Amino acid sequence: MAINGGIKSLDEARVQLEHMDGVMVGREAYQNPGILASVDREIFGVAGADADPVAVVRAMYPYIERELSKGTYLGHITRHMLGAVSGDPRRSPVASLPERKCA
């Protein structure tokens, strides 16, 4: 069984995992993707560095370029990425992308 909804932090998820098989953090992960930056280490015990939000955004560039070449409007992609860098002074990788549509 899994709990779905209302989980706002990995600490809350950890408490739920003491008596549940899974925890869903969909809305929080969408609005605050930083919650997932350390999930591998904190929940699953995987060694390694936490995810860097700027690196994650930059990893999206090839996908963005492919989509722009198909005529996809940039805002349709980037609006789902803004939470990844909100509050981060290095957020320029998303903020500096021009609002444009390739023909």
Image: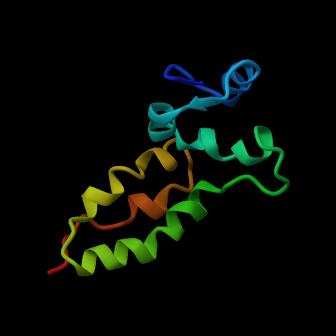
Residue depicted at x 47% and y 68%: 60
Residue depicted at x 47% and y 60%: 92
Residue depicted at x 53% and y 69%: 59
Residue depicted at x 35% and y 78%: 65
The image position of residue 91, as x and y in percent, is 50, 55
Q: How many marks?
A: 0
Q: Colour scheme used in the picture? A: rainbow
Q: Quadrant of the N terminus?
A: top right
The image position of residue 55, as x and y in percent, is 60, 64
Give the quadrant of residue 36.
top right
In the image shown, does 9 or 43 lie closer to the viewer? 43
Q: Is residue 89 above or below residue 19?
A: below
The image position of residue 100, as x and y in percent, is 21, 69
Tell whether 52 sits left or right of 5.
right
Tell whether 103 sits left or right of 8.
left
Give the quadrant of residue 69.
bottom left
Which residue is outermost to the left? 103
Tell whether 16 sits left or right of 102.
right
The image position of residue 58, as x and y in percent, is 52, 68
Q: Is residue 51 above or below residue 28?
A: below
Q: Quadrant of the C terminus?
A: bottom left
Q: Is residue 85 above or below residue 26?
A: below
